[in-house]
Image (tube, rainbow, N blue to C red):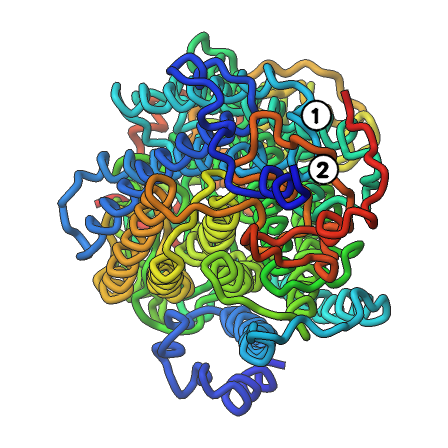
């Protein structure tokens, strides 16, 4: 399909040469193309452009021709002609609609493809605030520029500390608002090494236009690692999450398939949970956040409403680390690896100690 | 009196007319005459246009280089916010309905006035009051939220959001009053022989506009009141810090503001239908389709607000549905354009100033409408959303469409309003400057947007400098065109050549009276005709005016029908 698309763009639509021959993107209309689906977007844009051009030239051409041919001349009045023609009018109402249906379909298909996030996509947490970006990688490192690896699918889980923002990488043709009080997510599959513009696209206050940074696509993990150790993680996020879990949740929630006051949480992440009213909900970031802050909203079937809100007690970072812990458990990670989940462990002792068991990907603090 | 003298009195230049019927400040300030209220509205909205236009020129000057520092970031944000807020709420929404509609609508119906003259005057004073609040916001700590007032930023900013939103709230009521008035007037005060399908199409579009004004504007009022409550007394509706939902505000806001886009463009389309027909001297092609397309646009316009939220994280299904409905609006809009072209066919086309504006409208609205397709399609919208592409798109519709049509309408009815003719050559020069300046301003913005330039940016990447500079040059040409047009019109109103009742051979009822009209609009019973039947118009040399054949040959004249009230 992509070959066909590229062929169309290259052969029949010479104004928009294909990406291979022009790595910096089409010279006039578009920024460089650096991610999967960007070609589809450009193709649809070009297709709509040419359809519109044909119609526009037709309309303006007819207008100019008629204005010259039937310009007012002395002694010549308007000539009789029909004042309506139902067949003609129906035709020009309905026939262009077919093109509209095609545009709608292509746009919707392209959109849905970009929303299908593969399960193995790397998760990077984006925290936007007036007027800066913070990116947190799976190993806990942070940076202020976004660093990705070529060919690796990535899912951005985005939160805002203050007002609306919007993540926009023009070279990927992708954009999603970042809304305070909830998570939004965005999927990229970078296909070209390079540096691209990353901008806030939703007006966020005085320094809105300063909220620009870079999105850099690296050929491999190591070159990326050199760039992302802006704040080096002391712990893997899931370990902090385990500690938070132990202090706040372990009284009511087991992590070994054991039912306490509440349901066990070790295999919940990403699964569908059945609620008391019979509906199902996916255990994702938004659900976990809601369950912590407004526990009354959704009650799991066969359990009663016992939980109190953690609003004000857990901050945004705590919640993200708890989520990381749930993900870790679901992926088969051993909670004992943290050495601190069995029974109650003095938080002060945990907070000062090194990880007892090294975990792949986690680097000890310097 | 001979019949010729009677005709002279009926269709001539009236030295005694609504303008000098009574004198003094109070005779204007307290007038209930729809014509005077229309003129006052016209002066008001033109002032708003010029003020917000100056803001636009300041913005464009600031953007000449990528990081100019001419304005601080905060000042830039205030400039674009007030440019948008004043243009939208104080200029475009009332522009055609309240200014031109007020003047023309009752006369097109053959009526003496609107149904509720006092409500009409109240609407004008609400406009003054609402615009005043916007200016108070400007004079105190300004406003930097964008005209959309998106939460939670609008709740947290220290600028005068309360004054500005209250201003918009009051302006909303002004708009509702106009809508109610027009709806009732069209329903109850049409000439007895004027069925729905013998109304001029401008009235159909004003009627459709009135429906939107009445149904959608209250939602804006509620939304803005909730915002004010949240800001003043901390009721948590939209701010997540108070347990609210910021996306709810966007839904509420666009539930009004998208239909409001059609409040802006529908009357413009109505004017174009009039201009094309009169200056081609041809019966409008496909009257029924044009009339119903106005209603279709008004109704479909209520169902597409979600396309402003494609990137907001709303559910994918909802996004899909809104995209589909958005495309459906394209059809009635295209129908109108095709019908206008068909009207030109075999006409007798006079390329005078109003017609030049009408043709500019078809060109510019064509681009504005077609670029909407890029934004209706989901995958391309995700890329183009909140970029300069969107800015260019809605300026092509709002300025290229509405402002162009309004100027065309003003030039068309100016001789009727003031009984004097403008300099047509200078009028056309002004039209050319507006048209070329406008294209130069906004076409480069499509390219910038497609290349990824976000909107509302005080500083930007240097690769966009060249596009911004074209755009800035264009903005000044556009500004010069508008100023020239205003000068031509004002000069004409004061010193222009006197004209008689129907210099352009219009067939609708507002041309069946003297110029300017008398205080009571019609001093004689009007003769109801098809508003687009120009075959019966006869040029009366002694009168220097076009009149219906019946007035030349009195034996063909039907029995007068008593007018309403």
Percent position of residue A100, x then y: 69, 66
| Residue sitting nearer the eye, B472 or A50 | B472
Dots 1 and 2: beta carbons under 8 Å?
Answer: yes
Crowdedness near tag 1: few (<14), some (14–19) or many (≥20) residues, C-alpha within 10 Å: some
> What residue is shown with label 1?
A298
Q: Residue furthest top?
A: B233
> What kind of element bears circle 1?
loop
Q: Is residue B158 above or below residue B361?
A: above
- Residue A86 at x, y percent in the picture: 85, 66
The residue identified by callout 2 is A281
A124 vs B28: above or below:
below
> Can residue A18 be spotted in the picture?
yes
Q: Nearer the viewer, residue B453 or B50?
A: B50
Residue B327 pos. (x, y %): 68, 57
Residue drawn 71% across the image and 74% down it: A79
Element type where label 2 sits in the image: strand
């Amino acid at each position: 399909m992509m070959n066909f698309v590229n062929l169309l763009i290259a052969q029949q639509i010479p104004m928009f040469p294909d990406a291979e021959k022009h790595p910096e993107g089409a010279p006039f209309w578009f920024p460089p193309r650096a991610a999967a689906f960007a070609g589809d977007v450009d193709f649809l844009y070009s297709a709509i452009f040419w359809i519109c051009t044909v119609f526009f030239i037709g309309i303006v051409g007819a207008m100019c021709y008629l204005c010259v041919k039937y310009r007012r001349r002395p002694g010549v009045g308007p000539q009789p002609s029909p004042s309506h023609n139902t067949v003609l009018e129906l035709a020009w109402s309905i026939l262009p609609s077919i093109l509209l249906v095609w545009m709608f379909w292509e746009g919707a298909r392209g959109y849905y493809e970009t929303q299908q996030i593969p399960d193995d996509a790397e998760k990077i947490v984006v925290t936007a605030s007036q007027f800066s970006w913070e990116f947190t990688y799976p190993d806990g490192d942070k940076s202020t520029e976004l660093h990705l690896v070529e060919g690796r699918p990535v899912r951005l889980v985005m939160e805002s500390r203050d007002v609306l923002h919007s993540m926009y990488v023009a070279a990927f043709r992708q954009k999603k608002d970042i809304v305070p009080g909830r998570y939004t997510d965005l999927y990229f599959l970078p296909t070209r090494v390079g540096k691209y513009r990353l901008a806030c696209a939703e007006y966020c206050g005085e320094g809105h236009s300063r909220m620009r940074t870079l999105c850099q696509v690296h050929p491999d993990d190591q070159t990326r690692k050199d760039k992302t150790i802006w704040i080096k993680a002391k712990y893997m996020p899931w370990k902090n999450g385990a500690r938070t879990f132990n202090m706040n949740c372990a009284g009511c929630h087991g992590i070994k398939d054991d039912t306490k006051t509440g349901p066990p949480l070790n295999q919940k992440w990403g699964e569908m949970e059945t609620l008391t009213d019979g509906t199902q909900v996916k255990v994702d970031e938004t659900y976990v956040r809601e369950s912590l802050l407004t526990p009354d909203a959704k009650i799991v079937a066969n359990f009663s409403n016992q939980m109190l809100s953690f609003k004000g007690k857990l901050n945004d970072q705590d919640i993200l680390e708890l989520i990381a812990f749930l993900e870790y458990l679901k992926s088969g990670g051993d909670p004992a690896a943290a050495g601190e989940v069995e029974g109650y462990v003095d938080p002060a002792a945990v907070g000062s100690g090194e990880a007892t068991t090294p975990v792949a990907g986690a680097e000890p603090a310097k | 009196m001979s019949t010729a003298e009677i005709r002279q009195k009926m269709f001539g230049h009236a030295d005694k007319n609504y303008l000098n019927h009574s004198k003094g400040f109070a005779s204007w300030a307290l007038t209930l005459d729809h014509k005077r209220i229309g003129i006052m509205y016209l002066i008001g909205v033109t002032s708003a246009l010029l003020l917000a236009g100056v803001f636009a020129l300041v913005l464009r000057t600031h953007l000449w280089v990528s990081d100019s520092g001419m304005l601080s970031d905060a000042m830039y944000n205030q400039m674009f916010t007030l440019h948008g807020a004043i243009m939208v709420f104080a200029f475009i929404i009332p522009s055609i309905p309240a200014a031109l509609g007020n003047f023309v609508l009752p006369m097109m119906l053959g009526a003496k006035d609107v149904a509720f003259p006092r409500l009409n005057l109240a609407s004008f004073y609400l406009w003054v009051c609402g615009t005043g609040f916007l200016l108070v916001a400007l004079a105190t700590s300004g406003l930097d939220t964008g005209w959309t007032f998106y939460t939670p930023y609008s709740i947290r900013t220290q600028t005068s959001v309360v004054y500005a939103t209250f201003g918009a709230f009051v302006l909303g009521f002004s708009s509702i009053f106009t809508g109610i008035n027009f709806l009732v007037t069209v329903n109850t005060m049409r000439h007895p022989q004027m069925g729905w399908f013998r109304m001029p199409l401008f009235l159909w579009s004003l009627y459709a506009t009135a429906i939107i004004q009445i149904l959608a504007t209250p939602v804006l009022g509620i939304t803005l009141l909730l915002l004010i409550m949240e800001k003043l007394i901390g009721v948590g509706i939209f701010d997540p810090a108070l347990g609210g939902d910021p996306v709810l505000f966007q839904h509420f806001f666009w539930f009004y503001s998208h239909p409001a886009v059609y409040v802006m463009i529908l009357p413009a389309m109505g004017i174009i239908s009039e201009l094309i027909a009169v200056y081609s001297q041809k019966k409008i092609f496909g009257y029924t389709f044009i009339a119903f397309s106005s209603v279709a646009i008004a109704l479909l316009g209520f169902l597409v607000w979600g396309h402003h939220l494609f990137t907001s994280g709303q559910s994918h299904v909802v996004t899909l549905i809104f995209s589909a409905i958005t495309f459906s609006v394209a059809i009635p809009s295209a129908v109108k354009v095709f019908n206008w072209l068909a009207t030109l066919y075999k006409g007798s086309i006079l390329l005078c100033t109003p017609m030049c504006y009408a043709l500019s409208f078809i060109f510019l609205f064509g681009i504005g409408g077609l670029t909407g397709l890029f934004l209706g399609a989901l995958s391309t919208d995700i890329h183009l959303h909140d970029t300069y592409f969107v800015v260019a798109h809605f300026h092509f519709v709002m300025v290229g469409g509405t402002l162009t049509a309004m100027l065309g309408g003003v030039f068309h009815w100016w001789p009727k309003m003031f009984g004097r003719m403008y300099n047509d050559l200078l009028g056309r020069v002004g039209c050319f400057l507006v048209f070329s300046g406008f294209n130069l301003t906004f076409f480069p913005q499509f390219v910038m947007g497609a290349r990824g330039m976000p909107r509302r940016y005080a500083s930007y990447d240097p690769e966009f400098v060249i596009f911004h500079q074209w755009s800035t040059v264009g903005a000044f040409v556009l500004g010069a065109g508008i100023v020239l047009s205003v000068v031509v019109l004002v000069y004409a109103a004061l010193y222009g050549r006197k004209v008689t009742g129907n210099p352009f051979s219009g067939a609708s009822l507002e041309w069946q009276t003297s110029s300017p009209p008398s205080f009571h609009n019609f001093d004689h019973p009007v003769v109801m005709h098809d508003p687009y039947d120009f075959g019966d118009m006869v040029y009366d040399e002694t009168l220097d005016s076009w009149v219906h054949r019946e007035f030349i040959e009195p034996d063909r004249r039907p029995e007068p029908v008593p007018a309403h009230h």
